[in-house]
Amino acid sequence: MANPIVAVVGRPNVGKSTLFNRIAGERISIVEDTPGVTRDRIYAHAEWLGKNFSMIDTGGIEISDQPLLTQIRQQAEIAIDEADVIIFVVDVENGVTDADEQVARILYRSNKPVVLAVNKVDNPERRSDIYDYYSLGLGEPYAVSSVHGIGMGDLLDAVIKRFPDNVVNEDDKSIHFSFIGRPNVGKSSLVNAILGENRVIVSNVAGTTRDAINTQFKTNDGQEFTMVDTAGIRKKGKIYENTERYSLMRSMRAIDDSDVVLVVLNAEEGIRELDKHIAGYAHEAGCGVIIVVNKWDTLKDKDHRTMTDFTNLIRQEFQYLSYAPIIFVSAKTKQRLNQLPSLIENVYNHHRQRIQSSVLNDVLMDAIAANPTPTQNGRRLRVYYATQVATEPPTFVIFVNDPELMHFSYERYLENQIRKAFDFSGTPIHLIKRQRQ
Ligand code: GDP
Ligand code: GDP
């Protein structure tokens, strides 16, 4: 949880996304590909010398209808708000431009650690050109060629050296959760409503820079919660906040830091493409998921079917989230908000649940007796034994004679039988098939 964040900023075409892709490589933490979820390259996980971090390509957060310079400055502000370390990319072919100088000034004033990458230094002759960039006042320029992968080691050494000391709070037994969703669904209204109803213990928990944006509270029964990322939600008024890409990036970040995420939908507007996109990331990350339908007060003339119809629609549009509980709330009237903490706590417990092997195998053997394993070309799938190898999310290894013989539909059946026997609502579960001779 809570990896350091590295943001890449700079003018268009200097090579930000090339550098981003080079550093992130294919290390995308996707366990499975969910159909219908487009891959975005604005946020990714990366690692250098055993240090894990997350990266943001601010160039991917386009702020339309704004002059180029405004866009670049806004991207720099996003980087300052979001990141622990900023990589400022300039292009050796252009020399120091006015725009570079402006961005450098903004970054300099922020006091955030900045590493200056002079890109497109494809051959050694160009190395002497990088000294001009000392004039930006951001310290040593690092010569890199993102296309050829030159200079990456020195650059990344400099980046990880600037990571904040990770103050891991061992005593923190609180449940980390966050509201995610597209702009205007009511995330900040929900945050404020929840904090209004509960006892806030500490805001601004000390530790890394970014912990300062979490808020801890306690419910009446004594359970402690940490609401992740609330500062970004509460601080309003930036142009970029209502862009889809920004809300997507923030959602992806919040997912990283949360045990349970609450995907917020707007009852008034229904389900949009971006809702599915965001929910898809939550699912793939393997955290606990609750679907919160907010603004329930705006639907007039509700009858006994309204909720069922909406539930059916959600089940149809978010098929991969069939395990996620759905709750219909209103941040405005506070309807059902008091049920949220216990729902989050339940999902958190399911996400960490561990099932004894003997009990698990009884369930599987009963399932197989009730619905025999499939055959293919005269060969029958044999299931020998299963065991839970991990939690968060619960992960089971099933030993079989040949994984190829386990069809998707039969795997689905086994998962459903496991879910019937044990309460895993709100958490994905992973089944891994492994061959045993
Ligand atoms: P962004 O707009 O800053 O994200 O820039 P891109 O990553 O899209 O790169 C812009 C152009 O510069 C592309 O044509 C890249 O292939 C090219 N480019 C990026 N890095 C390098 C490099 O290290 N050397 C050279 N010669 N070209 C590069
Ligand atoms: P965010 O962008 O997701 O953080 O959304 P906000 O919390 O800023 O809410 C967007 C707008 O929806 C604001 O005008 C809120 O007052 C309004 N809003 C939020 N929750 C509710 C609700 O439950 N009912 C109604 N009627 N309006 C709401």
Image (tube, helix red, strand yellow):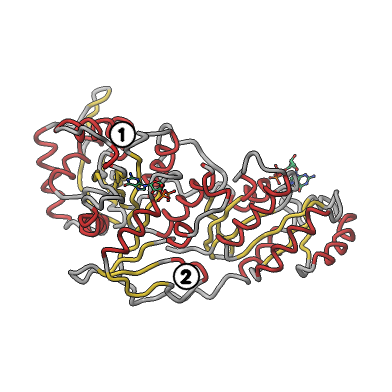
Q: Quadrant of the C terminus?
A: top left
| Horizontal side, residue 73 vs residue 54: left or right | right
Q: Which mark is residue 394?
A: none
Report which residue position mark 1 lands on: 319
Q: Secondary structure at mark 2?
A: helix
| Horizontal side, residue 172 vs residue 19: left or right | left
From the viewer's perspective, is the residue at label 2 or at label 1 nearer? Answer: 2
Asked if 257 appears above or below 336 in the picture, the reply is: below
Mark 2 close to ligand 2, CB under 8 Å: no
Frontmost residue, 412 versus 290:
290
The residue at 57%/44% (across/down) is: 41
| Horizontal side, residue 204 vs residue 142: left or right | left
Mark 1 close to ligand 2, CB under 8 Å: no
The numbered mark, 2 or 1, whose residue comes first in the sequence reads 2
Frontmost residue, 70 versus 299:
299
Q: Do the numbered discs 2 and 1 sit on residues whose CB atoms are within 8 Å?
A: no
Give the quadrant of residue 351.
Answer: bottom left
Please, what is the three-letter code of the amino acid marked with disc 2?
Ala
- In x, y percent, where is residue 219? 23, 67
Asked if 411 appears above or below 152 in the picture, the reply is: above
